Image (cartoon, rainbow, N blue to C red):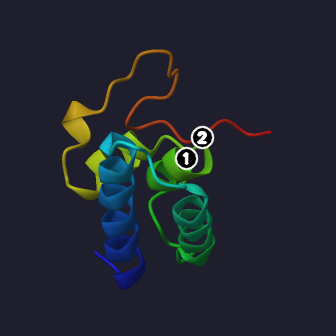
């Protein structure tokens, strides 16, 4: 896991904790940091991880980074583990 991926995982876990907290804190700074870290991913980063982060599927990104990809729900997703993202 790269340093950027490790920092992403930490931010994703903290975001999840923030969402559960009552009253809910302002999430904008955390979301800005997640966007910054997403842009900082190296070009060789896994395309599926990029897919999750760019679409703000943060739970899926967290599971992916925790090596729990088998737990990622595939409902509504037409991509498979072996298929590349669709071209635009």
Q: Are marks 2 and 1 in contact (CB under 8 Å)?
A: yes
| Location of the N terminus (image quadrant) | bottom left
Question: 61 above or below 85?
Answer: below
Location of mark 1 (residue): 51
Q: Secondary structure at mark 1?
A: helix
Question: 59 above or below 41?
Answer: above
Q: Is residue 4 left or right of residue 30?
A: left
Q: Is residue 13 left or right of residue 40?
A: left
Q: Secondary structure at mark 2?
A: loop
Looking at the picture, how far across and down is residue 10, in whole percent? 31, 68
Q: Residue at x 39, y 54 (%)?
A: 15
Looking at the picture, how far across and down is residue 53, in whole percent? 53, 52
Residue closest to the far front: 23
Task: Kindly report which numbered mark, 2 or 1, lies closer to the viewer in this rendering.
Answer: 1
Q: Residue at x 74, y 40 (%)?
A: 87
| Location of the C terminus (image quadrant) | top right
Question: 39 above or below 28?
Answer: below
Q: CA distance from mark 2 to mark 1?
A: 8 Å
Decide: few, some or many residues near mark 2? Use Cα within 10 Å; few <14, some 14-19, many ≥20.
Answer: few
Location of mark 2 (residue): 85
Residue closest to the far right: 88
Q: Mark on residue 76? A: none
Looking at the picture, how far across and down is residue 47, in whole percent? 51, 54
Dot placed on the residue nearer the N-terminal end, 2 or 1: 1
Looking at the picture, how far across and down is residue 40, in whole percent? 58, 78
Decide: few, some or many residues near mark 1? Use Cα within 10 Å; few <14, some 14-19, many ≥20.
Answer: some
Q: Residue at x 40, y 44 (%)?
A: 23
Residue closest to the far top: 76
Q: Quadrant of residue 73?
A: top left
């Amino acid at each position: 896991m790269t340093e950027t991926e490790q920092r992403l995982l930490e931010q994703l876990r903290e975001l999840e904790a923030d969402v559960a907290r009552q009253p809910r804190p302002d999430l904008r700074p955390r979301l800005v940091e997640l966007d910054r870290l997403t842009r900082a991913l190296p070009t060789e980063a896994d395309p599926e991880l990029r897919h999750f982060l760019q679409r703000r599927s943060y739970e899926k990104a967290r599971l992916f980074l925790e090596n729990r990809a088998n737990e990622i729900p595939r409902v509504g997703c037409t991509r498979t583990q072996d298929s590349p993202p669709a071209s635009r």
